[in-house]
Image: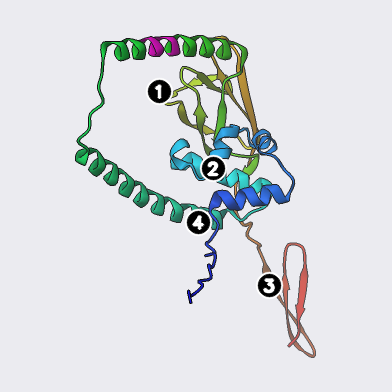
Amino acid sequence: MLTKFKTKKIVTNMTVGECLQKKREELGMSIKEISDKLKIRENYLENLENNNYDKLPPDVYVKGFIKGYCQVVGYNFEKMLTLYNKERGIDEKMQKKKDTKKVKKISLSTGYPIITPKIITLFFSILVIAIIGYYLWYQISSFSSTPYLFVANPLNDRIISDAHLQVSGQTEEDIVVKINGEDIYVDPMGYFSETIYLKPGNNKIEIEAINKFNRITSEIRNIIYQKELEPVPVHTKKENIVEDSGLYEIEIFDEDMEFIGP
């Protein structure tokens, strides 16, 4: 008689992307709604939910995505950040193992494809057509659409006590970025970072991304700069009054008076 084995499903911890996706679906929100609130591309959010970190920008921007996402759906950012760092460590180890297996597999392979002039001609013909099609599509889409702009810091309006504020983010290639009308440096990958000086009170910061067709995408942040108030010393003076019944000491403050008996 054959022994029957029962299968048991192993429950594993949810990933950052699964946690965010589950919470979003519980709230009845779509990817587009999250994208509109955070001004982040939908495909970035989809890759984040699917844990496709290799298709996302560097870690500093991914953490900005997670922080904004947590604020929208009401998750604790610190817990998500800890889980994200743990996942990235595991993901990097798995990727190294996969790359090692691929190298071994290629080195052990003995079969080679047969390349004929006809295959070469067909390959280059398809490549040229694809390049021309992509160029035309890129020019048309660039002309009709506004440039991409993501402001990583400051993510939202806030109140700070430091007169120095770092404004950083990402845009597309060949885009001019301005902060309050002043051009700032953008590296070849589209990343920018600039420190600005705040005046006391409300500071309106406008970040603009302008493409070669003069199409503009702008983000506005209202930052309130409040200096930390120094404590005001309270000056006191003492007076002694002698009466028949004894000595009384009166301590007089600027506003209040306290009577201390013998």
Residue positioned 27% across, 46% down in the render: 100
Q: Earlier in the sequence, mark 3 or mark 1?
A: 1
Residue type at tag 3: Lys
In which quadrant of the rendered view does residue 160 lie? top right
- Residue 48 — which label? 2
For discs 2 and 4, the disc positioned in front in the rendered view: 2
Distance from disc 1 to disc 2, alpha carbons, whole Å, reads 24 Å
Q: SS class of the residue under badge 3? A: strand
**Category of crowding for the residue at label 1, using alpha-carbon neighbours closer than 10 angstroms: few (below 14), some (14–19), many (at least 20):** few
Residue highlighted by disc 1:
188
Q: Earlier in the sequence, mark 4 or mark 1?
A: 4
Residue positioned 56% across, 31% down in the render: 150
Give the side of residue 87 with respect to residue 152, left or right. Answer: left
Q: Earlier in the sequence, mark 2 or mark 3?
A: 2
Is residue 42 visible in the rendered image? The answer is: yes
Distance from disc 2 to disc 3, alpha carbons, whole Å, reads 68 Å
For discs 2 and 3, the disc positioned in front in the rendered view: 2
Residue type at tag 1: Pro
Residue highlighted by disc 4:
83
Residue 97 located within the stretch drawn in magenta: no
Q: SS class of the residue under badge 2? A: helix
